[in-house]
Image (cartoon, rainbow, N blue to C red):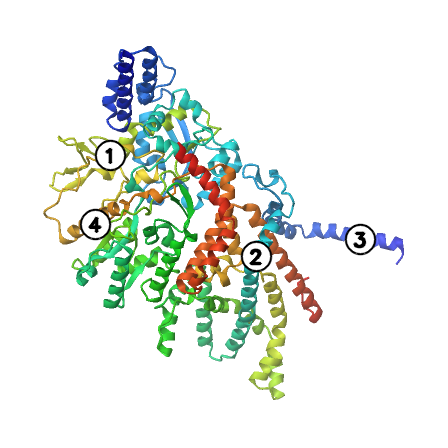
Amino acid sequence: MKKVLAMLMAFVMVLGVLAGCTGNGGNSKAESSKPAESSKAEQSKTESKAEASTPAESSEPESTIPALPFEETLHVSVFNDMNAKFVGLVEDYADIPWYKWLAERLNVVWEFSNIPTEAAAEKFGLLISSKKWTDVIDGKFGNYPGYDVQAYKDGIIEALNTYMDEGYMPNMLAFYAAFPQFEQLVRLSTGEYLEVPHLRIVAEDLNSNGLVVRKDILDALGLPVPTTIDEWDATLRAVKAAYPDIIPFSPRDAKWMNSNVPFIAAWGMTYFEYNDGGTAKYGAVQDEFKDYLTLMHSWYEDGILDPDWLTSDTKIITAKVAAGQVFSYVGAAGGNLRNPWNAIVTEDVNSPVEYEGAPVPTLNKGETPKMGHRDNVHTLYGGWYMTTQAPDKYRLAQVMDFLYSEEANRTMYFGIEGENYHVDPDGRINHYEIGADGAVVDLRTSWEPSRTATPSAYAQGYFVLATASIYKDNNPEIATPEPVDENADELTKKLRHIEEVRQTALKLWASFDPVNRMPELVYTTEQLETRTEIYSEIENYVYEQVARFIMGDRDLNDFDNFRTEVYNMDLETALSIAQEVLDQYNGK
Amino acid sequence: MSKKARTSGQRTHWQMVAHDLKVNRTIYLLAIPMLVYYILFKYVPMYGVTLAFKEYKFLDGILGSPWATPWYKYFKQFVTGRWFVITVKNTFLLSLLDFIFGFPAPIIFALLLNEIRSTPFRRTVQTITYMPHFISVVVVCGMIVQFCATKGLFNSIISFFTGREGKNLLMQTSWFRPVYIGSGIWKGIGWNSILYIAAIHGIDQSQYEAAKIDGAGRFAQALFITIPCMAPTIIIKLIFRMGDMMSIGFEKVFLLQNDATLQVSEVISTYTYKTGLKGMKYSLSTAINLFDTIINLALLLTANALARKFSETSLF
């Protein structure tokens, strides 16, 4: 009985610790520091857990792990590329408030390489072949043959396991303990942790694209926002009949018909690999794919699909949207939804043009879509890698680990308390302040150099960091919307309305159940090589043939031959690798 | 010649070289930067072609990577691939068509321009036709894409005359080649005619006067005086052109092609980019490029040999 009680208590404590690292870290510290009267084994186990979740700066003074900020300044050289968002705002990443704050907080000196994005791949090659690596490489192993796994085998990347085991990276451990599903994305099958990853764990951060429709046209025709494929078909045809000069549907470009799955998602698949209840399948060879092609072909024939869909690009579609020439399109929330619309209302405040996000379509009414557009939580393009040449690896590990501390995460998202936000009496975070002249002041502007007059997403979190948006998720208590300024003119009100539509659209596009989405699988170098070899060939072929089928250049009765051709390109080998790794993934 | 005389002759030859180097040393000094440039940037990087025969390892570099087994592994991969026939055919056809239509165009243009008597008008035409050459190929292709769109310039013209609604030209296999070649002529005609115009200006006017006295009209003058006098220039340009036969410009094809026209628009260079560089198969892309270069070299040598056989002008 006593033993059971002890175990129960230990369990509760572990829970407390986990809650601590997901939410209010402050409280959990106090809880876990009260050791329970239980068996010694249990006690030591929980203590080690508790220690792991405590941020490094509060480690015991007798510990050999140096306290933060360091007594002796640490120089950290980072190979990074300069995100376009920051060009013209700062010359050096070290001047970004977030890195300035980190430098002060940790007593480090940043030495960023600040490579322009367009030269990044080339400079990365030079850096690697020079064999004089920076202490940290920010992402970029997407350009390395065999990716980061091979770079680790080649002795460029230092695995972080030693530092995690020896207690230099408590925040990473706490994070992985709380979110084993993300640990699975980062840890290699052989057990190594190569990076402090950049993870986007909030679903809404992972998708900024989806279908957009002209609300004013729908209203004029008395139609609701379409939700199923049949409704879409009927609506687009009705639009074509009523407004012959308006293009009913325009994808951003041909590849977006797949990568952003505007309509193929209704069949629960993409053109490429997808996960059908634990089975790896290939979209383009399914029977349903023929239905999709048939629909798209009829849309092309009947002038519903943009006749220029294959030669379109972001600029062209944005111009068309700004000119009010399209009824529906694949929109990007910030890019071709807000910007052209802003331009329209800036030109003419009373313009009747009104856009709205549409949900991911389904085949049957009321179904939850099983597929939709979603970026990977963990990509090869983010994350900080420690190189084997870093001189002070232990302290560098601490610096990298600090990015995952609550303090860092909170600061990254909200800025510095008192300077960039206030905590309202009800506990909500408030970024606004009424200035001396009565105008509303957005306090974030000094924190986010990429902030423009229109409120944008928290840009920094996406582009600068090796961390996860943990505390963004768990602190929904941000005071929104902005306090309404009664004196605002028509244009300001309209722009705010656009921003609201944008936010609603973002939520709508993210509201699907991604069960059919292929999880982010971690492959070995050999598996990756085989897959890349097979798929680079198949994917080009699929895109080409899909274009031909839709254009009517190839007859749809020829679909079976197309399927055979794809199978002949060694599709099954690639699929069986995916199946093997998918089984391992699901087995966990 | 006796043995003794020959050796003494050789010595004088080397002595002459030494003497020449000494006397004209400042002029030779001026040539050094150019030599260094060629050695450094054209000859030294040539060791990179060994990549085609190697299993490239990023960290070990080109020299350190192990040799592929068998050595022709990547060539075989390309030649047996599905795209081999299509890309080689398209590269060759596009080059050939570009050559057939694109090569004579500036010559004809120069001849026509020469017949214009009004100097201000000629100058204006010349300047306007130079213009497209200075526009970046990316911009030119952007313009072409817009012109070829369903409601673009060309379709407006077509539907004006035929009354039928046109389709995007770049999305039809039958239109890709005409658009590609036509736009190439438009972009290059003024610029490429410069050399011919210069050649025409260099022709001795007394020949025309003599022809006029013999009763030759404008057409006969062009045919029997202007063209033969331009011939050396034309042949040299022709040889250069033959050397470039297979190396069809990457950017323009890449920017004008799309999935619907790959059957006619996928050329060796775009294929190399897609499978080789994007898939990080550096050895394969080097092998494909080497293959391309060897064909180019063969064409160049053939053209040169033919030129030497049929006329007095040749590169070497």
- Residue under numbered circle 1: A414
Q: What is the chain letter for disc 2?
A: B
- Residue under numbered circle 2: B84
What separation in Å lies between label 2 and label 3 (alpha carbons)? 56 Å
Discs 2 and 4 lie in a common subunit: no
Describe the element under mark 1 as helix, strand or loop.
helix
Screen quadrant of the N terminus of chain A: top left
Describe the element under mark 2 as helix, strand or loop.
helix
Measured from the top left, where is residue A568 in percent x and y?
52, 52
Using the rendered view, name the quadrant where residue A352 is placed.
bottom left
Q: What is the chain letter for disc 3?
A: B
Note whether B45 is above or below A391 in the view shown.
below
- Residue under numbered circle 3: B12
Residue type for callout 3: Thr
Q: Which numbered disc, 3 or 1, marks the residue closer to the eye? A: 1
Is residue A257 visible in the rendered image? The answer is yes
- Residue under numbered circle 4: A501
Describe the element under mark 4 as helix, strand or loop.
helix
Q: Residues within 10 Å of mark 4 (few under 14, many from 20)?
A: some
What separation in Å lies between label 3 and label 1 (alpha carbons)? 86 Å
Q: What is the chain letter for disc 4?
A: A
Q: Residues within 10 Å of mark 2 (few under 14, many from 20)?
A: some
**B132, A240: nearer the viewer:** A240
Is residue B206 visible in the rendered image? The answer is no
Q: Which mark is residue A328?
A: none
From the viewer's perspective, tell me whether residue A300 is left or right of residue B305: left
Discs 2 and 3 lie in a common subunit: yes
Q: Earlier in the sequence, mark 1 or mark 4?
A: 1
Q: Are marks 1 and 2 in contact (CB under 8 Å)?
A: no
Q: Earlier in the sequence, mark 2 or mark 3?
A: 3
Residue type for callout 1: Phe
